[in-house]
Amino acid sequence: MISFNFLRKAAAILALSAGAALASFSAMASQAEEIQVSNPFAREIPPGAPASASFMTLKNLSGQDIKLVNAHSKAAQTVELHTHTNDGGVMRMRQIPFIEIPAHGETVLQPGGLHIMLIQPVEALKAGNEVQVELEFADGSRKTVTMPVKSVKRMMKCGAQMKCGGQMKCGGQMKCGGAQ
Ligand SMILES: [Cu+2]
């Protein structure tokens, strides 16, 4: 004979296994959900400047490396992932196919390093305004990041690492002292 207590136990076990199924489902979260964004901002540029850039810290909460493969923004006609390379003592920017965030690690996008290039801005990128940049990860998931526009002139000094005098180029358009 099946007791009421047995049925209650069976129901409890079923509920537990349903919970476990849910837990394993949430472990399959999209890459966008596994990435935590902190301190996002875009660089203020003077009107008519050819490009700006977006910076942020990307933290990977998962146990798998995650690749940021693209970025989108209504604020600029073209959005590219960029890095800086030291080319015989001259810092240059170049486009890269992805930015990797290591498992349980973080990747910092910052002036002079990795950044999201906002080319031919269609909005005034003035300090105090906000810009939205959508991040696209390797699994196709996306995350929209809203960030303030900030003046970052004080953070980037032309000197020790950067060489001025028109040596820092981005597609032949950018010059040190102008917008990055
Ligand atoms: Cu760039």
Image (cartoon, rainbow, N blue to C red):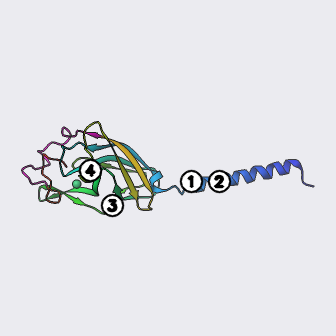
Residue 16 percent location from the top left of the image: 70, 51
- Marks 1,2: beta carbons within 8 A: no
Q: Amino acid at mark 4?
A: Val
Point out which mark residue 26 bears: 1
- Marks 3,4: beta carbons within 8 A: no
Mark with earlier residue (4, 1): 1
Identify the residue position indicated by label 4 in the image: 122
Point out which mark residue 154 bears: none
Real-space Cα separation, disc 4 to disc 2, in angstroms: 48 Å
**Disc 4: CA contacts within 10 A as few (<14), some (14-19) or many (>=20):** some
Q: Residue at x 14, y 47 (%)?
A: 178
Real-space Cα separation, disc 3 to disc 4, in angstroms: 24 Å
Real-space Cα separation, disc 4 to disc 1, in angstroms: 38 Å
Identify the residue position indicated by label 2 in the image: 20
Residue 25 percent location from the top left of the image: 59, 56
For marks 4 and 1, give the one nearer the viewer. 4
State the SS at label 4. loop
Q: Amino acid at mark 2?
A: Ala
Mark with earlier residue (3, 4): 3
- Marks 4,2: beta carbons within 8 A: no
Q: Quadrant of the N terminus?
A: bottom right
For marks 2 and 3, give the one nearer the viewer. 3
**Disc 1: CA contacts within 10 A as few (<14), some (14-19) or many (>=20):** few
